[in-house]
Image: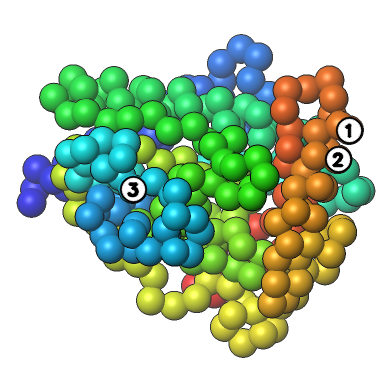
């Protein structure tokens, strides 16, 4: 058990240290807050249920790594100034758009780094992209990082369909499948969304600009239309099909408002 605890602490230090160094690289505009991590047993039965909840084509950990034992998940929050920059206006702020691009690249590079470090310990793992691994017509991912992170116990869903972690919901989620055995994180036994707790909050619904998000429904096509609008608006940047208005200036932007 002690060895497992030490390995888990080592993995977490890899993520934190890499992030600290990465954001000081030349050319990186984005700053990030403290990441949080959680772990899922690769044999958790909820992975099978994702085929019913999301899509029959949703992958299982063993599809990436036949001898998989653990799914490592982490949430990287944007620095508060980036979150605040995206409050006003219809379009996503340039800071938010740039953070989206740079964080996706960060997650890819971080996963590759973790893979290399675990390989030195004779463990295998697989690099999974942060985004754009979805069906272009159905807009459904074949590996939903946020649902995988939920299984791992990283947080609970808000009515805005985003995962609320102890460090909020305004950021990006990454995951990596490995054959390193780590003890799974216990899933939260209470809601993190104020609306789900007592119906007291509707801020994310109020902040949705085109009606894609309702208190009891979510229209992914309308949501993606807004994301594509932002991509056109920031046409001088790489692909920025992102919005994020429902995750900023809300009680769960920076932390878990129920704790």
Q: Relative to 177, does residue 255 appear above or below in the rendering?
A: below
Q: Is residue 96 visible?
A: no
Residue drawn where x is 21% and y is 28% of the image: 124
Out of 147 and 83, give the one closest to the viewer.
147
- Tell me the crowding category of disc 2: few under 14, some 14 to 19, or many 20 or more residues within 10 angstroms, Cα based: some
Tag of residue 233: 1
Could you give the CA–CA distance between mark 2 and mark 3, rounded to whole angstroms? Answer: 33 Å
Out of 235 and 203, give the one closest to the viewer.
235
- Tag in front: 2 or 3: 3
Out of 207 and 259, give the one closest to the viewer.
207
**Residue, disc 3:** 60
The extreme top residue here reads: 26
Are the residues flagged by discs 2 and 1 in contact, CB closer than 8 Å? yes
Secondary structure, mark 1, is helix
Residue 123: x, y in percent?
17, 29
Secondary structure, mark 3, is loop
Secondary structure, mark 2, is helix
Looking at the image, is mark 2 or mark 3 earlier in the sequence? 3
Residue drawn where x is 73% and y is 23% of the image: 238
Residue 30: x, y in percent?
65, 29
- Tell me the crowding category of disc 3: few under 14, some 14 to 19, or many 20 or more residues within 10 angstroms, Cα based: many
Residue 100: quadrant of the picture = top right
């Amino acid at each position: 058990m002690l060895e497992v605890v030490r390995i888990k602490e080592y993995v977490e230090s890899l993520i934190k240290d890499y992030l600290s160094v990465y954001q000081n690289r030349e050319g990186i505009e984005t700053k990030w807050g403290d990441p949080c991590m959680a772990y899922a047993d690769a044999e958790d039965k909820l992975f099978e249920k994702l085929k019913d909840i999301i899509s029959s084509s949703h992958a299982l950990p063993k599809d990436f790594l036949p001898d998989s034992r653990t799914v490592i998940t982490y949430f990287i929050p944007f620095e508060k100034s980036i979150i605040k920059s995206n409050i006003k206006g219809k379009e996503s702020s340039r800071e938010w758009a740039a953070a989206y691009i740079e964080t996706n690249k960060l997650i890819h590079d971080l996963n590759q780094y973790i893979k290399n470090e675990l390989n030195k310990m004779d463990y295998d793992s697989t690099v999974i992209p942060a985004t754009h691994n979805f069906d272009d017509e159905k807009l459904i991912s074949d590996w939903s990082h946020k649902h995988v992170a939920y299984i791992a116990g990283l947080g609970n869903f808000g009515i805005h369909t985003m995962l609320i972690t102890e460090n909020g919901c305004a950021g990006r989620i990454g995951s990596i499948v490995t054959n390193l055995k780590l003890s799974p994180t216990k899933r939260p036994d209470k809601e993190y969304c104020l609306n789900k707790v007592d119906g007291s909050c509707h801020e994310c619904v109020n902040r949705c600009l085109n009606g894609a998000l309702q208190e009891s429904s979510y229209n992914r096509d309308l949501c993606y239309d807004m994301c594509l609008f932002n991509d056109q608006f920031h046409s001088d940047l790489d692909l920025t099909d992102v919005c994020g208005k429902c995750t900023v200036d809300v009680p769960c932007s920076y932390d878990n408002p129920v704790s």
